[in-house]
Image (cartoon, helix red, strand yellow):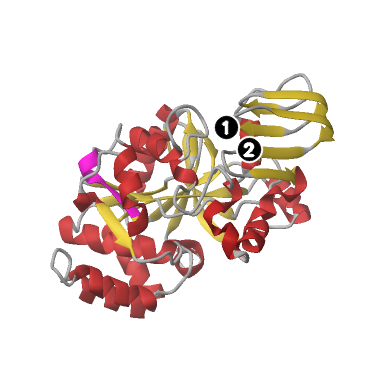
Amino acid sequence: MKLFAVVLAGGKGERFWPKSKSNFPKQFVALFGKDSLIQQTYKRTKKVIPLANQYYVIPKTLTALLKKQIPLKNKNIIHEPFGRNTAPAIALSAIYLEKISPDATMIVLPADHLIENEDKFFDCIRFANEIAQKGYLVTFGIPPSHSDTGYGYINIKDHYSTMDGINSYFANKFVEKPDLTTAQKYLKAKTYFWNSGMFVWKISTILDAVKQCLPEFYYVLKDFQQSIGTKKEQTLLNRIYKDAPATSIDYAILEKMKNIIVIKANFIWDDVGSWQALERHFVKDENGNVAIGAFSGKDTKNSIIVNDEGIVATMGVKNVIIVKTKDALLLVSKDKAADLKELIKQINKNKAYHKYL
């Protein structure tokens, strides 16, 4: 049973500006230890899937950076001409892998997630692989620890099976990021899980789903498949992507399919979506602050300070995030951290400031 990993590595990571920039996005930044998030993903994945069977989907502009951090061969890199969300990236990957090994199974992993309890994660992968062989599209649902409006959710229904104490369920529906009141209801219901964005399925199963839900794109990709490995490959791919649907795998496919199984994850997971994720993984001081780098605070509470050089000193502030790099300084209240993309848009309007993004 051949197993491939597809790592989606094209995210911009704008909510981690100014550490994350267009030419050095979040997945390449070392936020938790000496390794970047993508290096952690690679090292974790190679314990179950050799590097030769790992494929990374990424814009061509980031290829040099990717190869600097991970010892990949060119054949293991799938270049997207530009971002079109997860549905085209996953469908394109399946088309590449089908040509190599049509009966294989693929695991889809974002490059920038943090996972602890690795042994439990591997147990879930093995369980998912077994279920996938029966023609199911398998995903991992994370039992919510609190009411969170930053995640999509999966609603489960009937129990499907159990392996080594790990339970799986039939998916009922995928729901978009909720408001706080709805998130509180989801937490109380115990039948809603956070959508991890990680998937396991046979290549044939996901391509059948693409054929059903995105037929036009499917047939274009099948025609393109013949050009893989030829001189025409990149030119044709550029042409295809101009008209590719910009949509997520959840919205385009999973919300419409009935053969979806959700494994209730028993490992610790974080999609590291904003600076506030640091509070969940670093020890706070006596005032509730998380500080990385030189910092001195007086009357400073419940704040996050990340400092690359020099010193950051604060007095009389609370519930703020401060990030200081060589060429930029961010100061934002915690309750606005999830909206950092809006600030990036404003900065982007001034051409003189593009070099800082």
Characterize the local packing of mark 1: few (<14), some (14-19) or many (20 or more) Cα atoms within 10 angstroms: some
Q: Given the current orientation, which residue lies at the most extreme top position? A: 286
Looking at the image, which residue is at 58% across and 46% down? 18
Question: Which amino acid, by three-letter code, is at mark 2?
Answer: Lys
Tag shown at residue 308: 1
Q: Residue furthest left?
A: 230
Counting residues from the start of the chain, the first of labels 1 and 2 encountered is: 1
Above-or-below relation of 51 to 15: above
Q: Is residue 242 left or right of residue 160?
A: left
- Please give the name of the residue rendered at 74% of the width and 28% of the height, measured from the top-left corner: 313
Q: Amino acid at mark 1?
A: Asp
Residue in front for this viewpoint, 18 or 207: 18
Number of marks: 2
Residue depicted at 58% across the width and 43% down the height: 327
What stretch of residues is rendered in magenta? 51-57
Considering only vertical position in the picture, is 218 above or below 160? below
Q: Are marks 1 and 2 in contact (CB under 8 Å)?
A: yes
Q: Quadrant of the C terminus?
A: bottom right
Magenta span has 170?
Answer: no
> As drawn, is 22 to the left or to the right of 150?
left
Q: Residue furthest front?
A: 352
- Res. 145 in view: no
Q: In the image, which disc is placed on residue 324?
A: 2
Q: Nearer the viewer, residue 283 or 354?
A: 354
